[in-house]
Amino acid sequence: MEAAFNVTRSHWAPEWASWNVAPTTRVPVVRRADGGCEGAMLRWGLIPSWAHGQPGRYATINARVETVVKAASYRSAWRHGQRCVIPALAFYEWQQRDGRKLPWCFARAGGEPFGLAGLWERSTRDDGEVIESCTIITLPANPLVGSIHARQRMPAMLEPADCAAWFDASVIDAIGLLAPYPAELMDAWPVSRRVNSPRNDEASLMAPLDGDDRPDD
């Protein structure tokens, strides 16, 4: 993954890979540092610089593209160009059906890696500990994801070759780089409801359901 994102200096933890990432856990990100691309481990759930390292009352794992420029939790990171990408091979979204949450896995066609566009922030606790954290930017879903996700949202996906433009764009131009990834370049399949618990974290979670286990179309 380091090669795909041209990471020149990596601080990713040895156990960084996960098949079921939970909010508030540390996730690998790529960001600009010293003219290159640095791999770092950040808390998923952005803590604003002014919050003294303390999480707020509201979830900050996702930032809506429609409000990210002005929202209190994100505008400082946006204004200072603190952009990052979270490398991934897939992501999950849930379909509401008959009172159940049915998970689906989404990936680039062919299984190639991609990045989730995000912002990162640094906040200092009263005891001096520095907390680095991140959020994923979301936008209106393409037809494929929108057919599953009840709220018609999806993360902003970037191919590795497009990440440099995301890192280096001006504050004005950066927002124009965020658009729904083309549905025809993606695959989707239902997966086990074991994904619904963050206690489960193994590669088999991404395996497609088949036969009688698949939800009805």
Image (cartoon, rainbow, N blue to C red):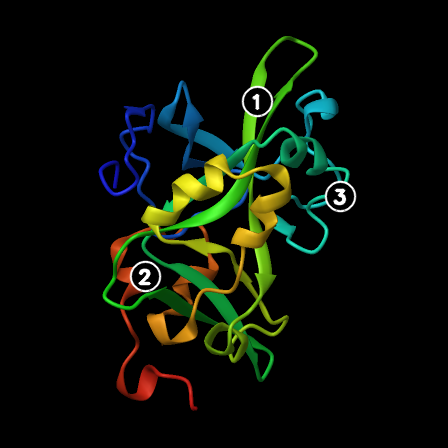
Relative to 133, 60 lies left or right: right
Q: Residues within 10 Å of mark 1 (few under 14, many from 20)?
A: some
| Amino acid type at image mark 2 | Leu
Q: For the residues carrying marks 1 and 3, which lies nearer the camera in this image?
A: 3
Label 3 crowd bin: few (<14), some (14–19), many (20+), radius 10 Å: few
Residue topped by disc 2: 205
Q: Nearer the viewer, mark 2 or mark 3?
A: 3
Residue 65 position in % (x across, y down)? 64, 54
At horizontal 58% and vertical 53% (from top left) the residue drawn is 176
Q: Where, quadrant-wise, is the N terminus in this rendering? A: top left
Reply above or below: 148 against 23: below
Amino acid type, label 1: Ile
Q: Secondary structure at mark 3?
A: loop
Q: Which residue is mark 1?
A: 131
Q: Amino acid at mark 3?
A: Ala
Task: Tell me where residue 190 sits by quadrant.
Answer: bottom left
State which tag comes first along the sequence, 2 or 3.
3
Q: Quadrant of residue 140?
A: bottom right
Which residue in the protein does label 3 denote? 71
